Amino acid sequence: MLIGEYHFNLDNKGRIAIPVKFRSNLGEEAVITRGLDNCLFLYPKKDWEQLAEKIKNLPLSQADSRAFARLMLAGAMMVGLDVQGRILIPDYLRQYANLKKKIVIVGVYNRLEVWDEDAWLNYKKQTEKESGDIAERLSELGI
């Protein structure tokens, strides 16, 4: 299970260190792609394959299905951890997530999210402020 929040620096080559506790979950290869809310999603290969299978089965005739498939699949790239536990984030994904020097890696059960630190702090502040309303809406789902 991938959980927690970790602050790191993006190096001048576009690499980030993956927290030690997550490295075994990611394995030798993982997939990084455009995420939602202007962050990046980083999936262990097995979890990525399960998600990609679900996306593949979305109805091609629906515009939202095509758009979501393009967002997730067209921007995806296989990445491997180097000997220091870092991954290289492609330039187009760094631009998409507006990553600067300070970044945050957030564990969200089966994936990691990579955020620009300022964007994460703003998102977290807003979400925490609305947490009561969010919980109330999710109560309909049995949460």
Image (cartoon, rainbow, N blue to C red):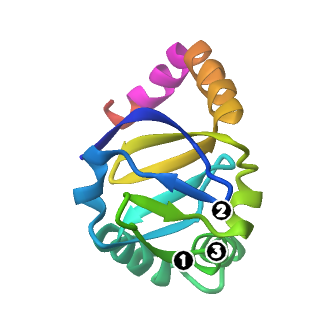
Give the secondary structure at mark 1. Answer: strand
Q: Secondary structure at mark 3?
A: loop
Q: Is residue 33 above or below residue 103?
A: below
Residue type at mark 1: give it.
Met
User: Residue 76 at x, y = what percent?
Assistant: 56, 75
Kindly identify which residue carries mark 2. 13
The location of residue 117, given as percent across then percent down, is: 64, 34
Kindly identify the amino acid type of the residue bearing the numbered disc 2: Lys
Of callouts 3 and 2, the N-terminal one: 2
Marks 1 and 2: CB-CB under 8 Å? no
Horizontally, residue 71 falls left or right of residue 55, namely right
What residue is shown with label 3?
Answer: 75
Task: Identify which residue is drawn at 36% across, 77% down.
Answer: 49
Circle 2 residues within 10 Å: few <14, some 14–19, many ≥20: few
Marks 3 and 1: in contact by CB < 8 Å? Answer: yes
Q: Which residues are magenta?
A: 131-139
Q: In this figure, which residue is indicated by the disc labeled 1?
A: 77
Q: CA distance from mark 1 to mark 2?
A: 17 Å
- How many other residues sit within 10 Å of disc 1, few (<14), some (14-19) or many (≥20)? some
Q: Quadrant of residue 84?
A: bottom left
* The magenta stretch spans residue 72: no
- Quadrant of the rendered image containing residue 50: bottom left
Amino acid bearing label 3: Gly
In the rendered view of the protein, which quadrant contains the C terminus? top left
Q: Residue at x 64, y 80 (%)?
A: 74
